[in-house]
């Protein structure tokens, strides 16, 4: 069905968008921070996506897309970088509003170090595969910056919690995208490890996407608070 990927995008964002007017979370009031973060991050990932499409790292099944796009990149794939980050950031905001983390964060740095180590291992064993190489190199750079070079905002405990919760819709949505398949992966350009039909790399692609979005979101929030425009 030609509208499959488009409908998946709509489904991803429908309830988060409607519930953004919830009085406690009131995510609509944070759009001025969320949308710039989504826009900047989306531009980076769109360039990445275009490159991978040209390199045949992945492609898109014409049976499931409407056929409108840019430089071989379907409209639905471009919308993905709006709908998925929005939904995940909404999850992040909801968890922070309803279940604030009061205790001192002692676990996020060791977890980040573990993930940084995994990135190094994956780069060592998968440096000849485009998806593995770029994915883990990018995640390493963003995560290292946030944990060790960023002194402005600390949010990693909340981030990891939101990421874990986001894995629930991730397995539903990405499971369908890879099983149908809507997105076709070049097996020669990834590690070959997968969870069901989902490539191992996809989990950390989502992590990098969400981490960059939330970092920028928190930076914009802090700057607004300092200027009295929060």
Image (tube, rainbow, N blue to C red):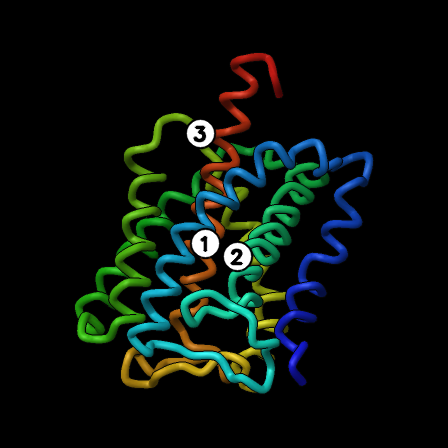
Q: Nearer the viewer, mark 1 or mark 2?
A: 2
The crowding category of the residue bearing disc 3, from other C-alpha atoms within 10 Å (few below 14, some 14 to 19, many at least 20), is: some
Give the CA distance from mark 1 to mark 2. Answer: 9 Å
Q: Position of residue 179 (x, y in %)?
A: 55, 85
Q: What residue do we see at 54% from left, 13% from top?
A: 227
Assign the C terminus to one quadrant of the image.
top right
Q: Position of residue 34 (x, y in %)?
A: 58, 39
- Which label sits on residue 81? 2
Give the CA distance from mark 3 to mark 1. Answer: 18 Å
Question: Looking at the image, do the residues carrying marks 1 and 2 touch, with CB atoms under 8 Å apart?
Answer: yes
Give the CA distance from mark 3 to mark 2. Answer: 24 Å
Question: Looking at the image, do the residues carrying marks 3 and 1 touch, with CB atoms under 8 Å apart?
Answer: no
Task: Name the N-terminal-most of marks 3 and 1.
Answer: 3
Task: Name the N-terminal-most of marks 1 and 2.
Answer: 2
Viewer-proximal residue among 126 and 62: 62
- Secondary structure of the residue carrying tag 1 is helix
Q: Which residue in the structure is indicated by mark 3?
A: 153
- Which label sits on residue 209? 1
Q: What residue do we see at 37% from left, 43% from top?
A: 109
Q: What residue do we see at 38% from left, 70% from top?
A: 201
The crowding category of the residue bearing disc 1, from other C-alpha atoms within 10 Å (few below 14, some 14 to 19, many at least 20), is: many
- Secondary structure of the residue carrying tag 2 is helix
Q: Nearer the viewer, mark 3 or mark 2?
A: 2
Question: Looking at the image, do the residues carrying marks 3 and 2 touch, with CB atoms under 8 Å apart?
Answer: no
Give left or right: position of 220 versus 138: right
């Amino acid at each position: 069905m030609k509208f499959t990927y488009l409908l998946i995008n709509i489904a991803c964002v429908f309830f988060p968008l409607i519930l953004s007017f919830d009085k406690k979370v009131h995510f609509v009031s944070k759009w001025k921070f969320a949308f710039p973060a989504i826009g900047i991050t989306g531009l980076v990932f769109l360039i990445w996506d275009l490159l991978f499409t040209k390199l045949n790292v992945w492609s898109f099944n014409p049976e499931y897309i409407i056929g409108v796009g840019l430089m071989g990149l379907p409209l639905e794939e471009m919308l993905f970088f709006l709908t998925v980050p929005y939904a995940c950031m909404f999850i992040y905001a909801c968890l922070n509003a309803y279940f604030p983390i009061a205790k001192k964060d002692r676990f996020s740095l060791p977890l980040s170090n573990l993930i940084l180590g995994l990135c190094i291992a994956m780069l060592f064993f998968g440096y000849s595969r485009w998806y593995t190489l770029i994915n883990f190199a990018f995640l390493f750079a963003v995560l290292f910056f946030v944990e060790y070079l960023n002194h402005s905002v600390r949010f990693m405990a909340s981030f990891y919690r939101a990421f874990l919760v986001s894995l629930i819709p991730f397995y539903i949505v990405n499971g369908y995208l890879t099983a149908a398949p809507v997105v076709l992966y070049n097996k020669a350009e990834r590690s070959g490890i997968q969870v069901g039909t989902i490539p191992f790399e996809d989990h950390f692609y989502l992590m990098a996407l969400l981490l960059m979005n939330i970092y920028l979101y928190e930076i914009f929030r802090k700057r607004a608070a300092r200027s009295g425009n929060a």
